[in-house]
Amino acid sequence: MKPEVLFSGLVSESLDPGESSSFKILFREDLSLKELLDLTEEGYSVVKTPHIGNFYPNNLAIAKTGIHMIVYDRNIGCVDRNFHPHTVIMNGLMHPVTSSERLMTHAYVCQDVEISTLKDGERAADGHLLALKKVFPKGRFTFYTDYVSQNKEISLLILKIVSEQKVLPEKFRWVRRVDSEGFVSTVSPPVRWEDVSRVGIFGLDNEKEGFLIPNFFNVLLCGIIEVMNSGKEEIYHLSGPDMVRYIGSMSHGLSECLSILASKKSYFPRRLLFNLVPAAGMRFATRSSKRKTLDDLISAYMAILDHRNRKGDFMKLLDPSVRKSYGHFFKDAEQKLRRDLYEAMTACPEVFYDIYQGDYISQHDVLHEGLYVPKWSLENKIGFINGVFNAMKGLQRR
C-alpha cells in the first residue's frame, strides 16, 4: 500500500532539499506495529499521544510494544468521553473517583476503588499512570506536562515567535486558562502574547495556573521537538479516533508556522514529514485469560479470507461462461464460515467496545493478569487490521 498524502503543507509536496518550508502530513496505513518498532531502533521518533485515564485495548496494545506514549494530562472528565479520566473502569463499569470538572493535572482522588492503584488523597492522573507502569514495566510513558517542561526553553521560544506573528485563526489561539484549583475558563479573543506571558503558561512558566497551550500548538510542539531530538526530518505519530478528523484544519497553519520559525532561527527545521498512522482499529488485544477467544476470532476471519482466495483461484480457471453455475457449490461453506465468525465475535466482545460508553477493559482490569497481544496484531499492516475490524463491525450490524 502506497503512502497517501492526506494533507500537504504551504509550498512543497516533498522533502527535497531545494524546496521551501513545509509541515507535510502523510496518511500511513502501510506500516505494522513491528515495522514501527524497527523504525525506533533506527533512531526515528515514533510516538502516540493518548489522554490520561482509562486506556482501552488499542492503547494498551501499543503501550505494551514500548512505543513512547506522551500521555496528555490536560483533559477534563466531563469532556473526555474516550478515556473517562475521573473514573476507574473495571469489568466494564465506571467507578467515579474524582471531580469530573477539574483538569486532570489538578484532580485528586476523593474515593478510592478497591484493588485499584488510585488511592484517596492522591492525584488521579498518577494513579492511572501507576497502573500502566505496573502492567508494562518496560513501557515508555511521559505526561505531556512533563514533556513540555523537559523541553521548556525551545517550547517557550516556539510559542513566543508564532504567537507574536498573529497568523493563526482565532480557533487556534490562546483562549483557555486554568486556575490553581483546576477549573478551566474561556477567555474572549484576541489575546495578545503580552497577556499570555504576563499571566504565564501552565506547566511551562507557571506550575499552578495560567494559559493552557492550544491543541494546535501541541501538535506543532510535538512535531518540532521530536524532529530536533531525533535529528531526522521524518517522524511517526500513531493517531486515535479524533486526530485524523481534526488535523486537516491545522495543515496550512502548521506549515506557515514552521516557515516563520525557520526564518527566525536557523536551528529550526525547514521541513517536517509527519507520518500519521491511524491506529484506532487496532483493537485486537485482551486479558491474558481470554487469549484463546481472541486467537479463535482472528482464525475465524482468516479462514474466510483463505476461502475467498481459494474460490477466486478456482473461478479463474473456469471459462467465464460457466463461472456463475459453480457459485452454489461454495454457498454452504461460506454460510458456515460466517456463522463461525459470528460465534467467535460473540465469544470475544472485548474487541467491540464503545469508548464513549466506557465498557472496555482498561489497565485496571489487566493489572493482575496481564495483557495478551497476538503476533498477528504486531505483524500485519495497520490498514489491513483496520479493514478486518471494520468488516467484523459490518457483520455485527446485519
Image (tube, grey):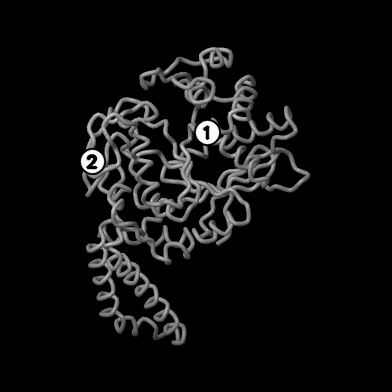
**In this figure, which residue is indicated by the disc labeled 1?**
218
Q: In which image quadrant can residue 338 be found?
A: bottom left
Task: Specify whether 60 is left or right of 366.
Answer: right
Give the answer, above or below, for where 337 lies relative to 149.
below
Q: How many marks?
A: 2
- Whether residue 26 sits left or right of residue 90 in the image: it is right
Q: Give how far across and how far down residue 263 sits, in percent.
A: 74, 30
The spot of residue 322 in percent (x, y) is 39, 86
Q: Is residue 7 above or below residue 204?
A: below
Residue 52 appearing in the image = yes
Say the numbered circle drawn on residue 94: 2
Q: Position of residue 335 (x, y in %)?
A: 26, 74
Nearest the viewer among 380 and 317 is 380
* Residue 244 visible somewhere in the drawing: no
x then y, percent, for residue 173: 52, 23
SS for callout 2: strand
